[in-house]
Image (tube, helix red, strand yellow):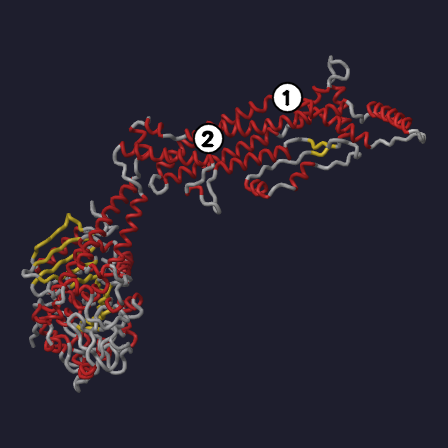
Amino acid sequence: MTITLDTTALDELSTNQAKKLHDLMSQLRSCGISSIVELPQIIVVGQQNAGKSSVLEAISGVRFPVTAGLCTRFATEISFHKTESSRVNVQIRRDNDSGGANTKDGEIDKAFDESGAAKDDLPELIQKAKEHMGIFDGGKDFSKDVLCVKVEGPDMVPLTLVDLPGIYVNETATQTKEGIKTVEELVNRYMAQPKTIMLVIVEANTEVVNHVALAKAREHDPKHERTLGVVTKPDLAKSQAHIEAAHVRLVQNREPTHDLKLGWHVLRNASEDGESSHERDAVEAKFLASPPWNAVDEADRGIAKLREKLSRFLYNHTSGCLHTLIEDIEKNLQKRRQEKENLGSERPEHKDKRAFLLTIAAEFQRLLRDADGGHYVDDFFGSLTSPRNRLRAELRGFHRALAFVLRTKGHTLSIARTSGDGGALKNESSAELDSVPRGMANFLDLHPYDFPLPKSVPRSELKRQLEVLALASEGRELPGSGGSELALHLFRVQAAPWMDIARLHIKSVAAATKSFVEQLIHHVLAGRNAHLTEELLLRDYVDKYFAERDEMLGMKLTELLVPYVKGYAVPLEDEFERLVSRWRVERLARQLQDLTLSGPATNDAKAREKDDKVRLLLAAVDMELSPDGAFDRTEDVIDMMQAYYEMSLRTFTDNITNLAIEGCLIHDLATMFTPVHVGNMSDKRLEELAAEPAAAKSRRAQLVTEIATLQEGLDMCRRWLPRADQHSTPTKRESGIWFTPDLPAEKTAERGKESPSTPKSAAAGLSGESRPALTPFSQSPASRVASGTAAKQPAGTSPFGFGDRGSSAVDSAFGSEASSNETPGKRDGVFQRKNL
């Protein structure tokens, strides 16, 4: 029996819009966009020796080296194009991990290009490509590169298939466990892509439960929406009736577990005796017309129908995905442009490096001055409710903390003003700590000053100790005139904690300031891909500055403490005398208020007033002569020490803040790294500081290539899509793998009649008892099921839920010659069976 190829069907599958859309996808693959964005495609999946290569050979008419297993070590993208002359082009598209010299991921390897060869040369070309990928005979590795085979000829339909390496589960002498993993990763990567239709090849002479590829397809496509099954080697199942019957049911889509919405197909593989493609097709047609395979719908058997089916599916699937594809390209384009912007400008020349560092230095100075002046406008300083990096505010907090800690913990002894209460004293430092403001408490929680509270000493006890110390400290001074020297000694004891408190304070402020500068450097260089520059600036400028300032601050602290340690600080006379006199008078007044004046009663007011004055003067003399008298020498020593301490504490606090912190640390911060530094740098120093990391250069070059690829692909897609459709969201009715047009009710009823000799069938995705006629590019899938087994779908919709529209946006983009060329006879005779 001979088989004739319906040229009308091929012509209608090769319409202008179909060829143009197919060429568009080929161009997108050629420019490498498939390595960035998923493209609509059909992949061929199956176990090793399932007959994948024979299927491809039958589709293309080109012989593949099936016996040597040369195509099983890498993915093979086979693209069919209708041209007047026949030829084959073979190229290699590199994978990111392949290590191809001077070739980036997704690019065509220019070192290997075999174009214009004859079809008979394909096995030899594939062998050469295999060796170019680094896979030699006897090797054990698989490659992630893609072999691109472009087949041109007058009998070709617009179709592209990706043949994946055969799945295997056991290692052999030439296939290792590592190969199993590589193949599985490759197959899973392709099958997981939502825009991919899976052409799953299974053998008819193997139990259905043992089809690993079918199980994998179910794993990636649990709803069976994008899987098309192909049964091969039906002639080898003759001796196994139950297996053969199971596969007949499978092809008829009557197996509930594997009920595919794209249906099934059956092919007979070519024999290995070298029969021609015409002989193969004739033998296949004769075999499939015999029982039990003649029970399969004619549209679901034979290579001619499979070509038509695949081309139709790919066209409709691609056209339905075009809107989504454009969106994906735009998203990826925007993402890569942003990443390229984050890498900063390229710095190939010394002038570019100097300009880069000048920008950094100017921005650093600007933000540093804003931080020092408290101008928190830039985003670097956060918001009102979420402030951060506010240097001046933190410095003010440190200054308040120093004053508070020196006031409450800066003195060794806590001394009451008087001792008239018998020595029961209140610790003033503890009282002040109990009433510390909330803001100060929070700051001290973050920056603790862990120093002990002053020791409480009754005034009377201190006076007794001072009397002893006064005797031990006597010199050549006149009697009663040595109090000032004793007061200075007592002051040094009282001010002893100052050094440790000030040292901790300076250390804390320096650490906080350095942390701020580090954050500022990081912020200025963020998004510029200058990690090495940041490290060098921190090491050579920031660390150096703070090391120098640390030494300077230590010297300044010693300088500020010397007058108080050595005892030559001179207080202001007026204030000092005023404080001592005031305290002496206050003490005398309190003592006089406590006196009880008594005398003989008299009615003479003048006499009574005179007696009171006399008694008051006598009482004052007695107080002066008493140990606790208002003019006692030890009382004067304590008053002088406390006056000197209060005046010195204010001065010391101000000096630490202004002369040490502000003068030695903060004032010169902006000079740390300036445009002047950059202007004076040598070329060698510029290269060291501003050179881009090799990884950044490589990534930028890759991004430039990818952006150009995406832009080129986007331009291609937009050229083929009408402008009105470029900004509209595709409806579900425009996104399916096939489309079904509306038909009048009477026509639908007529086509719903069954032929007595034909099993009742229903296209997947159509409702049970009526089946509308289909346009050439909208014919239903060849998944036919027996009566009652078809999944119920709303009338006029595909299994994806798409509507009944018979054309897509792409049809309007490329023309509508398919619909204009149709005739009822062609529709009924070629693409539909008359009596459904």
Figure quadrant of residue 163: bottom left
Question: Local crowd at mark 2 within 10 Å, few (<14), some, or many (≥20)?
Answer: some
Q: Amino acid at mark 2?
A: Phe
Residue 285 locus on image (x, y percent): 11, 75
Q: Which corner quadrant holds the N terminus?
A: bottom left
Q: Name, please, the residue furthest toward the left.
A: 85
Q: What x and y, as percent, mark residue 49?
A: 20, 66
Q: Position of residue 193 (x, y in %)?
A: 27, 61
Task: Name which of mark 2 and mark 1 comes first in the sequence.
Answer: 2
Indicate the quadrant where residue 620 lies. top right
- Binning the other alpha carbons within 10 Å of mark 1 as few (below 14), some (14 to 19) or many (20 upward) gives few
Quarter of the picture containing the C terminus is bottom left
Task: Compare residues 334 and 702 and report the one nearer the observer.
Answer: 334
User: From the viewer's perspective, is the residue at label 2 or at label 1 nearer?
Assistant: 1
**Residue lying furthest bottom in this view?**
756
Compared across the picture, whether 220 is left or right of 380 comes to left
Amino acid type for the residue under numbered disc 1: Leu
In depth, the one of 600 and 203 nearer the eye is 600
State the SS at label 2.
helix
Q: Which residue is mark 1?
A: 572
Pointer 2 residue: 546
Q: Is residue 745 above or below residue 625?
A: below
Which residue: 10% across, 53% down?
115
Residue at 17 percent across and 65 percent down: it is 811
Is 615 placed above or below 371 here? above
Q: Is residue 4 above or below residue 558?
A: below
